[in-house]
Every structure is written in structure tokens, then in C-alpha cells.
Image (cartoon, grey):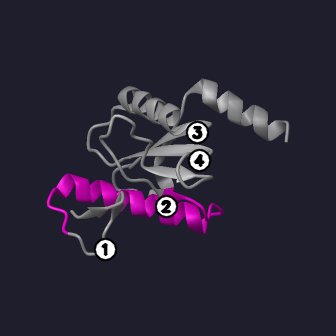
Amino acid sequence: AVLHGGVRQAGAAMTNPQKAKGSAYEREIVAYLQANGFPNAQRLYGAGRQDDRGDITIGGRDAGLLVIEAKNHKTLDFAGWLGEAERERQNAGATYSFVVAKRRLKGVEESYALTTLQQLCSIITNITNA
């Protein structure tokens, strides 16, 4: 794949089928979020870097209010993925992090959305105090 300034160039070949599957899922998530009230949802680039900031952000160009770590794997690793999402939240300076994991034989709208109970309580507190 050809990257320029952290942005994948249109038409760039992607030789790793797992990476292609993950990228397609990220695009599905962004499209779903944008169609459902989050027009500023966007993909981030730089996966695998030490300062990885997640796959998708909502709320800002780089360090948004929320970062999402997207997973499209046959085997589920919720604990590992939540740890990864938390590191990426810290790297991004974001308020919240979620893992959005593909469910087999389900559309993107039925994906798992995972966070910690601590973050869920913070979200609920912010909603009820708004």
C-alpha cells in the first residue's frame, strides 16, 4: 500500500488479506457512524506505531472525544482488545475508547461495542448531567 502523509492513497494495492478485511470493516463502521449522527467520524492511520491512536475517531481530526479500535477477527480477545483501546485512548488524549468487534454473519450495525464499566459510568454520568 502507498501511504502519503499517513493517508492511504486511492487505488493503492493492499497485499495482506487480513489487513484488507480490517480496513474494509473500518470503512463500514465510519460509514455507519456518519449515517447515524456522527458526521465527523473518520479513520486514523498509523496502526502498529508505538503512539497508535486507534482506528477511528469521533470528535476531532486526531485526538477526538472518542477513539475506536476496530476488530474483524474470527477469535474474540475482548480483554486484549480493551487493553489496546485504552493505550490508544491515552496516546490520542481522548476521553473515551471503545472496541467495535465484528459479529459473525451480522451487519456492521450489530457489531459488539465494548468498553470498561468505569468508562460506561463516566459516559452515563456525562449524559445524565448534561
User: Which residue appears at 49% of the width and 66% of the height?
Assistant: 31
Looking at marks 4 and 1 on the same chain, the residue that comes earlier in the sequence is marked by 1
| On-image quarter of the N terminus | bottom left
Residue 4 picture quarter: bottom left
With respect to residue 96, does 45 lie above or below? Answer: below
Does the stretch in magenta take in 23? yes
Residue 71 picture quarter: top left
User: Which residue appears at 48% of the width and 53% of the height?
Assistant: 110
Name the amino acid, label 1. Ala
Name the amino acid, label 2. Val
Give the residue pinned by disc 4: 64
In-front residue for pair 16/47:
47
Looking at marks 1 and 2 on the same chain, the residue that comes earlier in the sequence is marked by 1
Report how far apart the C-alphas of labels 4 and 3 lie in the structure: 5 Å
- Residues in magenta? 13-42
Give the residue pinned by disc 1: 10
Looking at marks 4 and 3 on the same chain, the residue that comes earlier in the sequence is marked by 4
In-front residue for pair 42/105:
42
Does the stretch in magenta take in 80? no
Q: Nearer the viewer, mark 1 or mark 2?
A: 1
Looking at marks 3 and 2 on the same chain, the residue that comes earlier in the sequence is marked by 2
Give the residue pinned by disc 2: 30
Q: Position of residue 122 (x, y in %)?
A: 70, 30
Q: Position of residue 5 (x, y in %)?
A: 36, 60
Crowd around label 1: few <14 · some 14–19 · many ≥20 (10 Å): few
Give the residue pinned by disc 3: 94
In-front residue for pair 66/122:
66
Name the amino acid, label 3. Ala
